[in-house]
Image: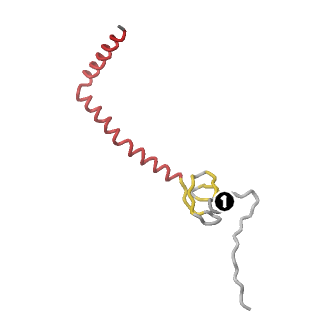
Amino acid sequence: MNNGWRFWLGWLLILAVLSNIGLQGLAQGLSAFLLFLVIAPPLVLWGLRWWVRRQIAVGPCPVCGTSLQGWNQTQTRCPNCGERLQVSGGKFQRLTPPGTVDVEAVEVPESPN
């Protein structure tokens, strides 16, 4: 018997809401909801793509020159040379212990005598 009262009270509540907002209000609300369902997914995808593009760094390995991709503010390894790298500011930097001097070797051709 309790379920019967809930059924009729539910229908009375629905009728009271419909009579207060009217069919025009119901149609406007339904069309606004459907418009939201159509517009929201592309906006969410656009926002997600924008965020990911800002978080991913693309550039060469500072040791071997291999093209790399990585998340900003993380550490990674170069798949070619195995060097540990820090990604910060959209660039890849070598992780070296404090006090290490990083030098670059240059080949000097022999001079003819």
Residue at the location (23% across, 27% down)? Answer: 23
Residue that extends furthest to the right in the rendered view of this protein: 99
Label 1: how many residues lie within 10 Å, few (<14), some (14-19) or many (20+)? few
Q: Quadrant of residue 39?
A: top left
What secondary structure is marked by label 1? loop
Q: Amino acid at mark 1?
A: Gly
Drawn side of residue 43 relative to residue 63, left or right: left
| 102 w.r.t. 49: above or below | below
In this view, the residue in front, 7 or 112, is 7
Give the side of residue 37 with respect to residue 24, left or right. Answer: right
Quadrant in which the C terminus is drawn: bottom right
Image quadrant containing the N terminus: top left
Residue 41 in the image: x percent, y percent? Answer: 39, 43
Q: Position of residue 57 (x, y in %)?
A: 55, 56
Up-down relation of residue 15 to residue 102 (above or below) = above
According to the picture, the residue beneath numbered tag 1 turns out to be: 82
Q: Quadrant of residue 82?
A: bottom right
Percent of width and height locating residue 13: 31, 17
Q: Give the quarter of the image for residue 9.
A: top left
Q: Nearer the viewer, residue 3 or 74?
A: 3
